[in-house]
């Protein structure tokens, strides 16, 4: 690919792409588009030395921190029921993400409950005890 140039480079799952790996194709592009979510899975870095050298942070994370004005949050999601999505929207995105109307109430079965919350703060568990048992 020596001498070849590209007008646009699209890096999908950029929040997991190691910075060094991104710079290789970036050198051959006039414009770069990163797609991904830095609030989800981080890159896999197996080297302690690399982590200590700050190589565990992706280029996308650096852009989010240093140039937030160039970052766009996709505010409509098409994957999951509103009740499931609401937690991540509130926790990571200040409640800005909404479910598309056609999947807002999506369930697998008619009697499906997409999410159930259990308060476990009152449960005392010893080292060899399980917090609950089942007779299945």
Image: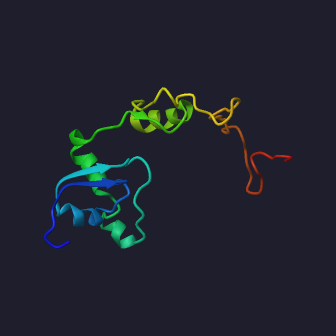
The image's colour scheme reads: rainbow
Q: How many numbered discs? A: 0
Which of 90/2 is in front? 2
Residue under the image location 37 percent in, 54 percent down: 13
Residue under the image location 29 percent in, 66 percent down: 21
Q: Position of residue 9 (x, y in %)?
A: 24, 55
Q: Which quadrant of the structure image shows residue 73?
A: top left
Q: Position of residue 3 (x, y in %)?
A: 13, 70
Residue that protrudes farthest toward the right in the picture? 135
Residue under the image location 74 percent in, 46 percent down: 131
The quadrant in which the N terminus is found is bottom left
In this view, 72 is above or below 49: above
Which of 37/127 is in front? 37
Q: Is residue 42 left or right of residue 123?
A: left
Residue under the image location 17 percent in, 63 percent down: 28
Which of 136/117 is in front? 136
Which of 1/74 is in front? 1
Q: Which quadrant of the structure image shows residue 121?
A: top right
Q: Which quadrant of the structure image shows residue 42?
A: bottom left
In this view, 119 is above or below 61: above
Q: Position of residue 85 (x, y in %)?
A: 51, 35
């Amino acid at each position: 690919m020596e001498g070849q140039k590209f007008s646009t480079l699209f890096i999908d799952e950029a929040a997991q792409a190691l910075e060094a790996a991104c710079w290789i194709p970036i050198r051959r592009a006039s414009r770069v588009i990163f797609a991904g979510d830095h609030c989800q899975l981080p890159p896999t870095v197996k080297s302690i030395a690399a982590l200590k050298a700050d190589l565990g942070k992706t280029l996308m994370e650096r852009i989010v921190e240093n140039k937030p004005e160039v970052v766009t949050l996709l505010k409509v999601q098409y994957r999951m029921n509103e009740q499931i999505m609401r937690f991540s929207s509130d926790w990571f995105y200040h409640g800005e993400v909404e479910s598309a109307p056609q999947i807002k109430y999506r369930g697998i079965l008619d009697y499906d409950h997409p999410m159930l919350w259990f308060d476990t703060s009152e449960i005392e568990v010893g080292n060899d005890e399980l917090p609950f048992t089942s007779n299945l």
